[in-house]
Image (cartoon, grey):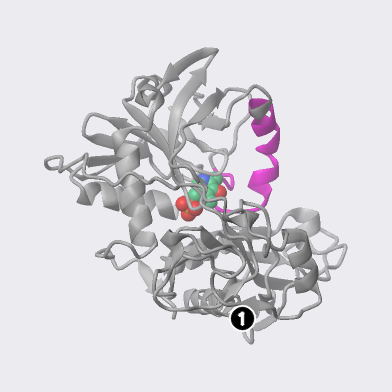
Amino acid sequence: MGCAFASAGVIHGGGALLSRCHFDRITARRLSSCSSPSFIPLKVQYAVRASRSLLSVPYGIRCEAAPSTVSRQAFELADVCWDDIGFGIIPTDYMYVMRCPRDGEFSNGTLEPYGNIELSPSSGVLNYGQGLFEGLKAYRKEDGSILLFRPEENGVRMRMGAERLCMPAPTIEQFVDAVKATVLANKRWVPPPGKGSLYIRPLLMGTGAVLGLAPAPEYTFLIYVSPVGNYFKEGLAPINLVIQNDYHRATPGGTGGIKTIGNYASVLKAQSEAKEKGYSDVLYLDSVHKKYLEEVSSCNVFVVKDNTISTPAIRGTILPGITRKSIIDVAVSLGFQVEERLISVEEVLDADEVFCTGTAVVVSPVGSITYHGKRVSYGGGGVGAVSQQLYSVLTRLQMGIAEDKMGWTLQLC
Ligand SMILES: *Cc1c(COP(=O)(O)O)cnc(C)c1O
């Protein structure tokens, strides 16, 4: 047996199962308020933005305010039809940029107008993939203030990745301050409550020129943001996964455990093949035994059986998701037994419920898994009670609807 599989798993909590069914059903009704004649199509709005005219409209003027979005406190919003934003990039006003020589330290970051960046053709990131990304979200509360969710965790993870790729990295304090500054500079792009969030994308890349294989001589830390809609507009929708046998996302000793850009182009082929066959995404197995669950292309995976929620342990081939970590703590607080350990394919096929976690989806219930042509369904075609409960508890905390007893949210203004 490979040494990567030798150590025992981690068991959290235990205790009695508390009110598993006390959850609020998220019923996100789609409001077609954009038929209003005052609506400006997105294309026009981009053109306006490109001319840098800082066009702001009072809250609710462009899209006739839906009753659920009426706020007691006015705040400025960009001219976007908030009911129609999806997951595409919507350019905003500013990006944050900070540079650093190979043996130096990051300092003097600045906010610059959002736009293209200039890069040497022989930069480390373009030639040798010396790059990392992060992803987190800011939500707007009913009172207009803005909440970040555990941004220091993203800063810690970026530092871990930077160490693996021989890059200098911002300190955690610099990282969090930069995220705050970027969100505040673009705050009119944070969607109104219930309409989505501001997705924050920090990058760390080797931007200095190299030809022989070596760490780049200069690095750039950059943050840009884009408003995104709620992933599940109509309430949680189960996804259908297929287990992949021929391709692997990560190998022991490799870089699967860090958010390096190089991990993502390599999952596109398996993902497109799966989508062509009608699946939502790919579930990867470990590359040594081809037997134990790892994760989905960009999400962690959890398996529910009775009162126990299990997830593959972090051993270098799985990305340590912040949603994963938070779901473990939330589940323990709700009285579930939570285990981080090896999970075999047989076990997942016999589970009561399966769900994925990640910043974009938060919790995504799995409706079916197909393995060697055999399809196993979960949740009886609907959303499992545990997935629904965890989604509800965590999103309410992130959005500031429920009190944050965990101390995970950071209020900006
Ligand atoms: C980013 C990512 C996740 C989820 O991490 P979060 O911090 O929860 O967003 C899971 N798996 C992979 C491969 C990822 O890149």
Q: Most extreme residue toward the left, as rendered? A: 16
Q: Magenta residues?
A: 253-274
Q: Disc 1 designates what residue?
A: 105
Nearest the camera: 177 or 342? 177
State whether residue 232 is above or below residue 128: above
Q: Residue at x 55, y 53 (%)?
A: 258
Query: Would you say residue 291 is visible in this rendering?
Result: no
Q: Most extreme residue toward the right, as rendered? A: 121
Q: Most extreme residue toward the front, as rendered? A: 37
State whether residue 339 is above or below residue 203: above
Label 1 neighbour load within 10 Å: few <14, some 14-19, many 20+: few
Looking at the rendered image, the quarter that the N terminus falls into is: top left
Q: Residue at x 54, y 14 (%)?
A: 372
Tag 1, which secondary structure?
A: loop
Q: Quadrant of residue 336?
A: top left
Q: Is residue 104 left or right of residue 371?
A: right
What's under tag 1, amino acid-wise? Glu
Q: Position of residue 21 (x, y in %)?
A: 22, 39
Q: Position of residue 26 (x, y in %)?
A: 37, 46
Q: Quadrant of residue 81?
A: bottom right
